[in-house]
Amino acid sequence: MLPMAAHAAADGDAVAITLVTAHDGIAPGGELGLGVVQRPAPGWHTYWRNPGETGAPAEISWQLPAGVTVEPIQWPTPRWLEFSGMVTYGYDEPSTLITRLHAASTLAPGTRLTIKAHIETLVCRDVCEPVSRDVSIIVPVMRTVAKDDRLAVAMAQLPKTLALNVSAAQQSGRTVFDFTAPEGTSSLHPSDRQIRGAYFFNESSDVIAPAATQSITALPTGFRVTVAASGPAVAAPVVSGVLVLGDGQSFRIQASAAPAPPRSAGLSWAALALAIGLAFLGGLVLNLMPCVFPILSMKLLALTRTGHETSAARTEALLYGVGVMLSFLSLAAMLEIARELGHSLGWGFQMQSPAVTATLSLILLLVALNMSGLFEIGQGLQSVAGNTAGRMTRLSPSANAFLTGVLAVVVAAPCTAPFMATAVGVALAQGGGVSLAIFTALGLGFAAPFVIMAHLLTRIPAVTKYLPKPGPWMSRLRHALAVPMYAAAAWMVWVFAQQVSLTGVWLLVLALTSVGASLIFSRSSPWIKGAGMGLGVLAGIFGALQAPAAGTVSATLATIPYESFSASRLTALRAQGRPVLVDLTAAWCVTCKVNERTALSDGKVATALKASRTVYMVGDWTRQDSGITAYLHTFGRSGVPLYVYYAPGRAPVILPQVLNAEALVKTLAPNAVKGDS
């Protein structure tokens, strides 16, 4: 006689719930597998024990006859699901929650046991419905139980259990969990193919956030999960979850805290030397990036002015280098302090502040006005900013050279040069002395060309005699070199416009106009100067405090279909086997804008994206975004641009920071995607 389920789904039910036993009955003193089967209607889904960012798992209350006990529920391997833009764990197909019944040896054969369960669960589609069901099944007590097993398929879907050790450490905005087998026990040895597409379903969202982008790598006796840190590294007494490999195998991980958390592996001397070398090369190349062009004009003017005064030229070149070095070391110190405080910052972090971009626009305007001869240097802020351009009245040439070096580093922040990204990523990941060494090398590379050029020109008479002699032409040159400074100031206003509301932009324009007018007309009326400066400062402060601007996109990118970057959406697209191109950019990133105007605006790239069905995802880092910062750190990067291509079934590929349309088309070619599948 077969056990009978008491509940059948009615037409229109979002989910049908029944009880099923493994065998026809249970023997006295024996055990019996029991399954709670949930069959969601098409388009609906139920939830795992950890539902993810939203949802609720099934809760079961048993009503058992005397002499019968029940074990805790075992959950089948869940699936990664996206619901209303949130990451959830659950089942969009029939699933069976499995337990075991135990019968007392005193139960008499022929007894009919009624097993009842009250089930509260949540089932969702575009809406969610709480479901409350009372189900039951009658189980006869038998001397002999048939060997057929109706739960064999469901049992096979349960993850295998592994007992491992777990340790946790926080490294540069990431939390690293190492799951390793205790000595003398069976361990997990996943292959590279199995690790690709692997995912760890943690049973507690407090330890690993469901929406966090995971990077899983194999260890000699286990595996490592790297995720964005949402707080201090957590090493719970027990970390449990299910690891699903790329080939579909699943393992339930029961991990106890290891004796000590892992530390960030130190760099070998060879690796450190390579990172320092890349930093120096990156500093050299940074001089050629577009954001440094305005500063090059100031360097040129200074070198022309002092070229015939060999001692003065060398001194000013060295002081320029000192200004550069101190600025880079100050940046390193700020990043290290933020790292120790648990904050996750990257290269160019200061450009994400509206107050900084507003201040830079003011400084660049003052430099341009002074170089145009529209006002002479006064004192206070005007003296600092204006003298940086090279026209001196209050400050000495030495102070001017030093401040030029400082301003050069500040304005260079929006650019990331080739070689530089990897080096800065290593610096932020390692911290301490490694970070100091890398930022020192970066500063030396940035300062070296001008310092070396100044020394060579002043030590080689054959070159020095060809330098033009000072005269009226210098004033005209100075006026011409003011043009890129005006352009840089206008660009900073545009960056500011991407960070605040329209009201904030108009307030900044009012501030710049007021300060500029007060300086130009200061000779005619001290009252105008004071009123203009006061109005400008107030307008600038209120402008920087305005609410953030709504999401914007470059006019270049607006012609290409794209999706806003989301770690959860990226995971979903990869699970669907779609190729994805991730583009992390910022309004203040000059390298990003150059790529958008060249490679990304090429019609062949748009055609290749469409032909290959590649999803183009754009992440805007103009203002601080912890999700984008965490994603950058998973690739060891600290700033934008970052371009990552995901081919189906393949590991992600980091593309060059300076894009080439032909190379990009080749990467996106449909036959390349097919070959990667």
Image (tube, helix red, strand yellow):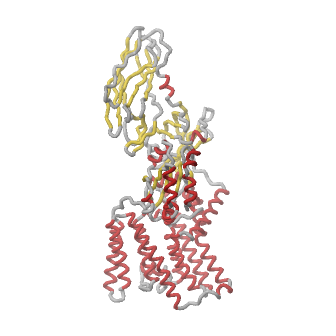
Left or right, 171 with respect to 492, comes to: right
Residue 646 percent location from the top left of the image? 53, 49
Left or right, 29 with respect to 135, comes to: right
Q: Total marks drawn?
A: 0
Examine the rendering and report whether any part of residue 675 can be seen: yes
Work out which quarter of the rendered image holds the N terminus and state it.
top left
Residue most extreme to the bottom? 471
Examine the rendering and report whether any part of residue 657 can be seen: no
User: What residue do we see at 33% from left, 25% from top?
Assistant: 9
Pick the front one: 485 or 315? 485
Q: Is residue 228 above or below residue 383?
A: above
Q: Is residue 259 above or below residue 110?
A: below
Pick the front one: 360 or 658? 658
Q: Quadrant of residue 286?
A: bottom right
Work out which quarter of the rendered image holds the C terminus and state it.
top right
Q: Quadrant of residue 12?
A: top left
Residue 117 percent location from the top left of the image? 35, 23
Q: Is residue 308 above or below residue 3?
A: below
Pick the front one: 426 or 449? 449
User: What residue do we see at 55% from left, 60% from top?
Assistant: 661
Residue 125 percent location from the top left of the image? 35, 38
Q: Is residue 626 above or below residue 211?
A: below
Residue 49 percent location from the top left of the image? 42, 34
